[in-house]
Amino acid sequence: MTFPSDIRNAMRECLLKILWAKDDIISFFRNNGCTPKDVAVVNKELSRARMIDTMFTHLASKPDRGLGQFRAMLHALVNWSHFDTFYFDKLKKLSRADAERAIEHLMQLQEIRDHKLSESRRRREKQVKEAQRPQKTLEKLKAVHIGLLQGDVPPQRRGYQLEQLLQDLAKLSGLTTTAPFRVNGEQIDGAIKFDGEHYIIEAKWEEQASSNESVYQFAGKIEGKMYGRGIFISMNGFSSHVVQSLVTGKALRTIFIDGGDLMVVLEGLVDFSDMIDKKVEAAQAKGLIYADPVTGAPKA
């Protein structure tokens, strides 16, 4: 995100209309978040306008685009009330009328920008809310699941459909979801937010129970994320040696879900959110990453 160029230009004009001494311009920068290193780029041998341009260009080139400093300067300028009588009245280097017009213009630009940002935020919130709204009932999702089991979808498409089914179930439980994405070359099958934590999802529809390789690959994805947590869904379950190898001597970051667990949810016996809660409880309290969604007992 960059600071709007029209507001930045209006701020430049304000500074030229309200400050004459170059030391005052430098003090203004210091008083609005510019560090000694920032201030060092400004040479007082430059003209007043060039000093301001140099600082603005420097701030805009920083990794954070100088957003904090620009916002602080904007706040200072739209609330400006000090007009130095030495330069405005005695030397008449500056005109108060010109300064006030420049400030008024800046205030108008700020109001327009804030209104646009507010409208944009409302539209974005509405879009996010719509995207998280459940599109299918539990009965329809159950029918989709049965169709997948009966081969209504080609094998190469079942994984994608399973991802969508999980997204829909999470939304039906009021959980915030993230669509599948790629990051640093890794394919992520989506994510859900549960109890304040984000869980990365891996969905597998394979003929056999998931093997060590796919589980370890997913564990690697989790390890590379801050406080990473994951949910691995394998329609045909997990072998006991896979479960044991993942928990032995390691921090528990992943919980396992199989096709039977999903069927329990689709039958309405437990809510999707309740299933996650039960499995997280089993992992945290008992060290079980593959637990029954109703009783919390180990499944393998």
Image (cartoon, grey):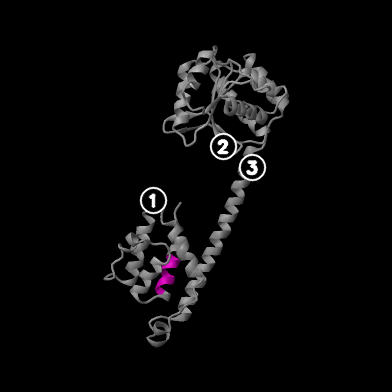
Q: Camera-side residue: 2 or 170?
A: 170
Residue 95: x and y in percent read 43, 81
Please report the residue visible at 62 percent of the width from the left and 38 percent of the height from the top.
131
Quarter location, residue 258 = top right
Up-down relation of residue 56 to residue 249 (above or below): below
- Quadrant containing the C terminus is top right
Residue 168: x and y in percent read 64, 30
Is 237 positioned to the left or the right of 35 in the image? right
Residue designated by label 2: 197
Mark 1 touches mark 3? (CB < 8 Å): no
Up-down relation of residue 116 to residue 45 (above or below): above
Quote the CA–CA distance across marks 3 and 2: 19 Å
Q: State the extent of the magenta-drawn residues as a range.
A: 9-16
| Residue 5 appearing in the image | no
Residue designated by label 3: 129
Q: Camera-side residue: 168 or 221?
A: 221
Number of numbered discs: 3
Which amino acid is tagged 1? Answer: Pro
Quote the CA–CA distance across marks 1 and 2: 28 Å
> In terms of sequence position, does the residue under pointer 1 or pointer 3 come before the other?
1
Up-down relation of residue 2 to residue 226 (above or below): below
Q: Does the magenta stretch include residue 216?
A: no
Which amino acid is tagged 2? Answer: Glu
Is 284 positioned to the left or the right of 172 in the image? left
Quote the CA–CA distance across marks 1 and 3: 31 Å
Q: What's the mark number on residue 63?
A: 1
